[in-house]
Image: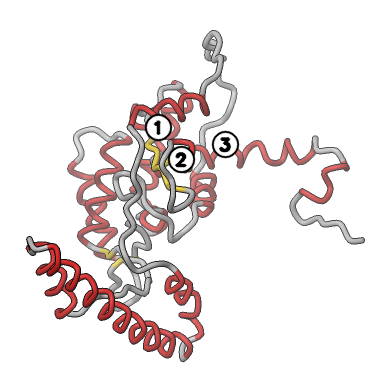
Amino acid sequence: MKNWAPKLDENGSATSFCNCVMEQLARMQEVSCQSLEKCLVQAGKLHGTYGSKKLVFRPSEDLLRLRRRRRTASDLVERKQLSFQIRKLHRQELRTWRSASRRLCLNNSSSWNLMRGMLQPTGRHVVEQSHPNNFADLLENIFSGNLGRPMDRPMLTEAPWSMNELRVAIRRAKNNRTGDDLGLVAELLKHAPEGYLEALLDVFRHALSTGQIPTSWQTTLFKMLPKSSCAKFASDFRPIASLRLLCKIFAYLMPGRMEDTLEDSQPEEQHGFRKQRRIES
């Protein structure tokens, strides 16, 4: 799920979403990372809509009827005839759909990017996947390493996170991104009420002071995307890691304090790779 949008009231505010979040927050017996995630997901589903703008080709009833007949046909000759009719009708409907979609997009400049989707095949391509153990071996080779002896946790000298730092970290999260395995997206946090952010800030402060992070942050889900239509082996797939949204926000908090120190220690040779600087020839 991605591209979440709240249901707005007459004043253009997400009042119903914020009220739902605060009601669930008041009923919590224990405020934790897991309970805050669950609270946000439930409120988002009740008082918001998920969706992404995409041009989708939908076959007609005649085409669907032919496909159903082919699935139930037992005679080989009949199946071949149905396949020929399906291909012919599919091409006709596809040409008509693309022509109509282009006319609609060209009349609205904000929809021009949607025409890129028409370059992709409209059929569902199923890639023959390798054995799961092969994927596990591939990921193990990529991320293996000698961790060494765990470092003793030093005495904390850092000040607790502030609300301003949390807001900056949330603003860094990009919109219109696919949610994590729970369905959390950045737009949910950007519309969250003040009380929820205060509870989230307390959870982050506890993790910073104790060094104890939620167990859900220690698990990474990987989606294996084929590099080509002929992907057969594990090496033909590209792993995409999916982390929890709150784990990403916590990670965004740390660069906020390190950026100034890192900027001051950068050599002049890195002039062209620093903020508000460039090289002209």
Q: Is residue 73 left or right of residue 93?
A: left
For the residues labelled 3 and 1, the Cα–Cα distance comes to: 32 Å
Q: Is residue 188 above or below residue 150?
A: below
The residue wearing badge 3 is: 254
The local secondary structure at tag 2 comes to strand
For the residues labelled 3 and 2, the Cα–Cα distance comes to: 26 Å
**Mark found first going from the N terminus, 3 or 2:** 2
Q: Crowding at label 1, few (<14), some or many (≥20) Cα neighbours within 10 Å?
A: some
Closer-to-camera residue (242/34) = 242
Q: Is residue 185 above or below residue 248?
A: below
Q: Position of residue 179 (x, y in %)?
A: 36, 51
The residue wearing badge 1 is: 135
| Tag nearer the camera, 3 or 2 | 2
**Mark found first going from the N terminus, 1 or 2:** 1
The total number of labels drawn is 3
Q: Position of residue 69 (x, y in %)?
A: 9, 69
The residue wearing badge 2 is: 239
